[in-house]
Image (tube, rainbow, N blue to C red):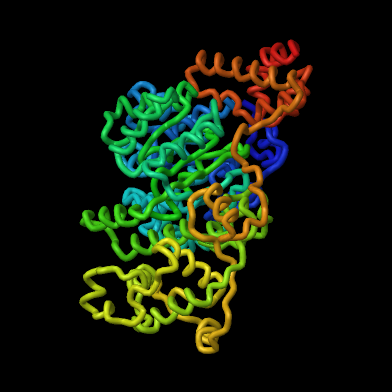
Amino acid sequence: MVDCIGKTPEFVLKTVFGYDEFRLLQKQVIDNVLNGIDTLAVMPTGGGKSLCYQIPALIFDGLTIVVSPLISLMQDQVAALNQAGVDAVFLNSTVDWEQYKESMNSIRFGTTKIVYVSPEGLATPRINELLHDANVHVSCITIDEAHCVSAWGHDFRPDYLEISSVRKQFKDAVCLALTATATQQVRDDIVRSLNMRNPSVLLSSFDRPNIFLSVKQKKKDGIEQIVECIERHKGESGIIYCFSKRDVDSLTEELRSLGYSALNYHAGLSSEVRASNQAKFIDDDVLIMVATLAFGMGINKPNVRFVIHQTMPKSIEQYYQEIGRAGRDGLPSEALLLHSKGDGSKIRFLFDESENLDRPRSEKLLRGMETYVSGQVCRRRELLNYFGEKYEGHNECCCDLCNLGEAPKVDLTIPVQKLMSCIIRTGAKFGANYVIDVLTGSKNKKIIERGHDKLSTFGIGTEFDADGWKNLTEVLVTNELLVKVGEYSVLNMTQKGLGLLRSRSKIELEFRTPVSTVEERRAMARAGKIAFPKPERKSAGGTFVDFGDDAVSKDLFDALKKWRRKKASEESVPPYIIFNDRHLLSIVSRKPHSLNELLECNGVGETKAQKYGGEILSVVSGF
């Protein structure tokens, strides 16, 4: 291991990790940590958060504590660091006592630079005593997945609340909190709960431009659409998220019967089966993991090319976190969300069954997800807008709606007047779902109790079904004719909308008829019902790298993957711990003839060059 104490971040980045330049906010976060400034950094999955504490840890002369929520995540990080020549350990229940004692001694002697612990482990007397040893100097405390500290986050964990008390015991240590998902409310919660001192709050872009976003109405059980997506990524890794354990098992069985390499993962399986299935997926022995949301936080697998949701998630935070497991290596990937009318009802039923649920908060998060699913504008723009970020990009192959081209302008005068009139007649006191129920003539008990079934607007909404009216509502909000007010998103008209209603002016807006497929839209266009201005653009899905006519490069890439798999098996680590696909592609591109040339390849640090250089150069020389 190269001595990095006191060296520059750039030196460590290149020498240890094999990268030429920092990404996103990495350099700014690292400089803050080295200068002792408490920092909360919000960076997307795959944005390189780990280097933000790993590089300072090697420059500091003391110990860096990393609080991590999952054992698998700790093991993965430590394996990758050890491969790069960094002395790092994890202390948890999976470590046998002899190894545990050896790791504690290496921390006391100062040879170990980074120790990973769980939040509950951090508070144990054994670790507390170790960290207060006279020979141990704690330089930095890093909290990974910091959104877990917030009750407003999508994955709140009470054990995280205990971190602040431990932090107070090491007042000279700088605090770094890292997360990929945090709204303003969650960010405020993290800063307060961790007692961060005058922190620097750094927000990277939430955008993952390499992930193609697609939302479709589910046909029956969705199996046809799921298979279509799998076929677009034939031979590549993917995750499919389902609503329940039963759904997971059923879909896994069906995919396996169709000849696909798939396994299941959920809380109903034994810990041994879950661990085995996860290991097979990580090691590329199985290509598809069908799972409930219990799967994924500890997965650092960079070559997941697609993530499918068989049903709508319960919040945008959950959705963003889960699709973030695709394309961590920055290569093109796909996120497909299938939804149906009953998804919201199923989720709300779970809300009703839960005794300790914050119902208003959960309902607000779910409404945000429903708004995203029924959106009429660029998915990426809507997603980033939820996190308070304005999307400045171009609509080129970023989502399914942009692939359809611009929405046609439609005369919506009568439907808009009906919707606005219904808002007025119900007293402007209700959200979109209730107003739409009145418009479509629902026999909802609350509508009848309030006498709203006697209103002149009851049942007059014959132009669209409920989904169509939801789409129209979102279009009117986007065009500032309607506004959602308060915690319950009550619909009200803006002055602009009220003016249009009073003047009875013609209202033409961009509006897509809510149909589920491009084929249905084309059929409607042929019938003259809608305009279809542009052909569908090629999506970002499909094979993640195209070698074209360069057969030599393709064969070299395949040979390097075969070599990598063999080394991973010999060393009992996942293949991507040796090198990920992006690193192999860099080697293919440069075709190095010497160790110095190999060191210029992406992801090849000095330790890996010394360890694997001869074998890699031997493989390359054959091409």
- Quadrant of the rendering where the C terminus is positioned: top right
Residue 110 visible from this viewpoint: no
- Quadrant of the rendering where the N terminus is positioned: top right
Where residue 505 sits: x, y (%)?
57, 84
Q: Residue at x 34, y 56 (%)?
A: 344
Q: Is residue 28 left or right of residue 425?
A: right
Where residue 68 sits: x, y (%)?
42, 41
Q: Is residue 262 left or right of residue 586?
A: left
Where residue 422 sits: x, y (%)?
39, 79
Where residue 456 sits: x, y (%)?
34, 82
558 in relation to 195, above or below:
above
* In-front residue for pair 339/52: 339
Q: Is residue 324 left or right of residue 356?
A: right
* In-front residue for pair 32/604: 604
Q: Residue at x 62, y 41 (%)?
A: 540
Name the image quarter holding residue 370.
bottom left
343 in relation to 495, above or below:
above
Q: Residue at x 61, y 15 (%)?
A: 563
* In-front residue for pair 164/206: 206
423 in relation to 77, above or below:
below
